[in-house]
Amino acid sequence: MDIQLKRGLLDVCVLAAIKDEDSYGYKIIKDMKPYIELSESTLYTILKRLENANMLTVRTAEHNGRLRKYYRITQEGTKRIEEFKQEWNEIMSIYKFVTKEDDGDDKA
């Protein structure tokens, strides 16, 4: 898969994982696991990129005596999810075109 396409898909998946509630790294990986396998190193790279793009914010809170980073989606992140939904319609149209069966009608 094209690396840029995959990067964009993973970014949106991470945003979707935190869209309903603040979350932290291990929980994000756990929540995504039924759909996509994601390593910690890949996740934290994505989280940093999304933070730099103002699509999420980070806060630190103590949990069981340790500091944990919690991630929250921003308005910009929510907007990106909505844009992705619109883009997906176009991607599906392209997919249908590329994978269409030969209808047996020779027009050559």
Image: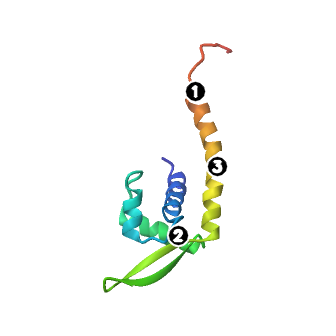
Please state if 30 lies on the left or on the right of 5 as rendered.
left
Q: Earlier in the sequence, mark 2 or mark 3?
A: 2
Q: Position of residue 44 (x, y in %)?
A: 43, 70
Query: Residue 87, which numbered label?
Result: 3
* Quarter holding residue 89: top right
Compute the Cα span from label 2 to label 3: 21 Å
Residue at (41, 52) in percent of width and height:
36
The residue most toward the left is 64
Please, what secondary structure does the residue beneath circle 3 have? helix
Query: Which residue was labeled with disc 1?
Result: 100
Please, what secondary structure does the residue beneath circle 1 have? loop
Query: Residue 49, which numbered label?
Result: 2
Please state if 7 lies on the left or on the right of 43 as rendered.
right
Q: Position of residue 6 (x, y in %)?
A: 50, 53
Compute the Cα span from label 1 to label 3: 20 Å
* Quarter holding residue 61: bottom left
Q: Amino acid at mark 1?
A: Lys
Asked if disc 1 and disc 3 are in contact, CB closer than 8 Å, the reply is: no
